Amino acid sequence: MKIAVRLLAYTWAAPYSLVGLFIGTVAMLFGGRARLREGALEFGGGRLGTLLSRLSAPFSFSAITFGHVILGTDLAALAAARAHEQVHVRQYERWGPLFIPAYLLSSFVQLVRGRRPYLDNRFEREAYSQAGQAVSARRHASTDSRQRR
Protein backbone atom coordinates (compact mmCIF):
# COMPACT_ATOMS: atom_id res chain seq x y z
CA MET A 1 0.00 0.00 0.00
CA LYS A 2 2.79 2.44 0.92
CA ILE A 3 4.48 1.86 -2.45
CA ALA A 4 1.20 2.52 -4.26
CA VAL A 5 0.73 5.81 -2.39
CA ARG A 6 4.31 6.92 -3.24
CA LEU A 7 3.81 5.96 -6.89
CA LEU A 8 0.57 7.93 -6.99
CA ALA A 9 2.33 10.97 -5.45
CA TYR A 10 5.08 10.83 -8.08
CA THR A 11 2.52 10.44 -10.87
CA TRP A 12 0.33 13.31 -9.57
CA ALA A 13 3.35 15.66 -9.52
CA ALA A 14 4.83 14.27 -12.79
CA PRO A 15 3.76 17.10 -15.16
CA TYR A 16 5.88 19.59 -13.20
CA SER A 17 8.65 17.06 -12.58
CA LEU A 18 9.02 16.78 -16.36
CA VAL A 19 9.47 20.56 -16.61
CA GLY A 20 12.15 20.36 -13.91
CA LEU A 21 13.86 17.44 -15.66
CA PHE A 22 14.01 19.42 -18.89
CA ILE A 23 15.56 22.48 -17.18
CA GLY A 24 17.89 20.23 -15.18
CA THR A 25 19.07 18.51 -18.35
CA VAL A 26 19.84 21.90 -19.89
CA ALA A 27 21.75 22.83 -16.72
CA MET A 28 23.82 19.64 -17.04
CA LEU A 29 24.68 20.53 -20.63
CA PHE A 30 26.23 23.71 -19.22
CA GLY A 31 28.25 21.99 -16.51
CA GLY A 32 25.64 21.44 -13.80
CA ARG A 33 25.50 18.35 -11.64
CA ALA A 34 22.64 16.11 -10.58
CA ARG A 35 22.09 13.97 -7.52
CA LEU A 36 19.23 12.22 -5.79
CA ARG A 37 18.38 13.49 -2.29
CA GLU A 38 15.39 12.58 -0.13
CA GLY A 39 13.29 11.36 -3.05
CA ALA A 40 13.94 14.39 -5.25
CA LEU A 41 16.40 14.89 -8.08
CA GLU A 42 18.53 17.97 -7.46
CA PHE A 43 20.36 19.88 -10.20
CA GLY A 44 22.83 22.62 -9.42
CA GLY A 45 25.87 24.55 -10.50
CA GLY A 46 27.40 25.08 -13.90
CA ARG A 47 27.15 28.13 -16.11
CA LEU A 48 23.35 28.17 -16.04
CA GLY A 49 23.44 28.29 -12.24
CA THR A 50 25.93 31.15 -12.36
CA LEU A 51 23.69 33.04 -14.80
CA LEU A 52 20.59 32.47 -12.64
CA SER A 53 22.40 33.63 -9.51
CA ARG A 54 22.90 37.02 -11.16
CA LEU A 55 19.20 37.71 -11.69
CA SER A 56 17.92 40.76 -9.86
CA ALA A 57 14.86 40.95 -7.61
CA PRO A 58 12.09 39.93 -7.98
CA PHE A 59 13.42 37.20 -10.28
CA SER A 60 16.35 36.08 -8.13
CA PHE A 61 16.34 32.75 -6.31
CA SER A 62 18.85 30.26 -4.97
CA ALA A 63 16.62 27.20 -5.48
CA ILE A 64 13.26 26.38 -7.03
CA THR A 65 11.18 23.21 -7.12
CA PHE A 66 9.21 21.62 -9.95
CA GLY A 67 7.48 18.46 -8.76
CA HIS A 68 10.20 16.07 -7.60
CA VAL A 69 13.00 18.15 -9.13
CA ILE A 70 14.86 20.86 -7.25
CA LEU A 71 17.01 23.30 -9.22
CA GLY A 72 19.67 25.33 -7.44
CA THR A 73 22.18 27.92 -8.49
CA ASP A 74 24.93 25.74 -6.98
CA LEU A 75 25.38 22.77 -4.67
CA ALA A 76 25.78 24.96 -1.57
CA ALA A 77 22.48 26.70 -2.33
CA LEU A 78 20.80 23.32 -2.71
CA ALA A 79 22.13 22.16 0.65
CA ALA A 80 21.01 25.38 2.37
CA ALA A 81 17.52 25.30 0.83
CA ARG A 82 16.93 21.54 0.94
CA ALA A 83 14.52 21.47 3.91
CA HIS A 84 12.48 24.36 2.49
CA GLU A 85 12.36 22.91 -1.03
CA GLN A 86 11.41 19.46 0.31
CA VAL A 87 8.28 21.07 1.78
CA HIS A 88 7.47 22.28 -1.75
CA VAL A 89 7.99 18.72 -3.05
CA ARG A 90 5.33 17.53 -0.57
CA GLN A 91 3.07 20.40 -1.68
CA TYR A 92 3.38 19.24 -5.31
CA GLU A 93 2.48 15.74 -4.15
CA ARG A 94 -0.70 17.08 -2.53
CA TRP A 95 -1.73 19.60 -5.19
CA GLY A 96 -0.35 17.95 -8.35
CA PRO A 97 -1.18 19.92 -11.53
CA LEU A 98 -3.11 22.45 -9.44
CA PHE A 99 -0.01 23.53 -7.47
CA ILE A 100 1.31 26.34 -9.70
CA PRO A 101 -2.14 27.89 -10.33
CA ALA A 102 -2.84 27.76 -6.56
CA TYR A 103 0.61 29.20 -5.78
CA LEU A 104 0.14 32.06 -8.24
CA LEU A 105 -3.37 32.73 -6.94
CA SER A 106 -2.06 32.90 -3.38
CA SER A 107 0.61 35.40 -4.44
CA PHE A 108 -1.96 37.46 -6.34
CA VAL A 109 -4.29 37.57 -3.33
CA GLN A 110 -1.42 38.77 -1.14
CA LEU A 111 -0.50 41.45 -3.68
CA VAL A 112 -4.10 42.71 -3.87
CA ARG A 113 -4.22 42.86 -0.07
CA GLY A 114 -1.07 44.98 -0.02
CA ARG A 115 1.05 42.18 1.39
CA ARG A 116 4.26 40.56 0.15
CA PRO A 117 3.41 38.17 -2.73
CA TYR A 118 6.32 35.83 -1.95
CA LEU A 119 6.73 35.83 1.82
CA ASP A 120 3.00 36.00 2.58
CA ASN A 121 2.12 33.30 0.05
CA ARG A 122 0.50 30.44 1.99
CA PHE A 123 2.80 27.86 0.37
CA GLU A 124 5.95 29.82 1.27
CA ARG A 125 4.73 30.41 4.82
CA GLU A 126 4.21 26.65 5.17
CA ALA A 127 7.65 25.90 3.71
CA TYR A 128 9.44 28.42 5.94
CA SER A 129 7.50 27.22 8.98
CA GLN A 130 8.07 23.51 8.45
CA ALA A 131 11.71 24.00 7.52
CA GLY A 132 12.25 26.17 10.60
CA GLN A 133 13.31 29.12 8.52
CA ALA A 134 11.24 31.93 10.00
CA VAL A 135 14.36 33.89 10.94
CA SER A 136 15.77 33.39 7.44
CA ALA A 137 12.50 34.63 5.91
CA ARG A 138 12.63 37.82 7.97
CA ARG A 139 16.24 38.43 6.90
CA HIS A 140 15.24 37.86 3.27
CA ALA A 141 12.41 40.38 3.63
CA SER A 142 14.66 43.04 5.12
CA THR A 143 17.28 42.45 2.42
CA ASP A 144 14.55 42.74 -0.23
CA SER A 145 13.32 46.04 1.14
CA ARG A 146 16.86 47.46 1.28
CA GLN A 147 17.56 46.35 -2.31
CA ARG A 148 14.37 47.97 -3.63
CA ARG A 149 15.15 51.42 -2.17
Image (tube, helix red, strand yellow):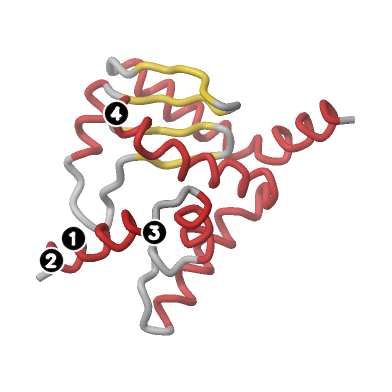
Location of residue 23 (image quadrant): top left
Quadrant of the frame with the N terminus: top right
Mark 4 secondary-structure assignment: helix
Residue 46: assigned label: none
Residue at the image position 22 percent from the left and 23 percent from the top: 47
Q: Position of residue 120 (x, y in %)?
A: 43, 69
Q: Position of residue 145 (x, y in %)?
A: 18, 68
Residue at the image position 50 percent from the left and 63 percent from the top: 104
Residue 134: assigned label: 3
Is residue 124 positioned above or below 8 on the image?
A: below
Q: CA distance from mark 2 to mark 3?
A: 19 Å
Asked if disc 2 and disc 1 are in contact, CB closer than 8 Å, the reply is yes
Q: CA distance from mark 3 to mark 1?
A: 14 Å
Mark with earlier residue (1, 4): 4
Mark 1 secondary-structure assignment: helix
Residue type at mark 2 is Arg
Is residue 89 positioned above or below 115 on the image?
A: above
- Judging by the rendered image, the residue that carries numbered circle 1 is 143
Q: Is residue 27 left or right of residue 140?
A: right
Q: CA distance from mark 2 to mark 4?
A: 24 Å
- Judging by the rendered image, the residue that carries numbered circle 2 is 146
Q: CA distance from mark 1 to mark 4?
A: 20 Å
Residue type at mark 4 is Ala
Residue 76: assigned label: 4
Total marks in image: 4
Mark with earlier residue (2, 3): 3
For label 1, the crowd category at 10 Å Cα-Cα, with few meaning under 14, some 14 to 19 and many 20 or more, is: few
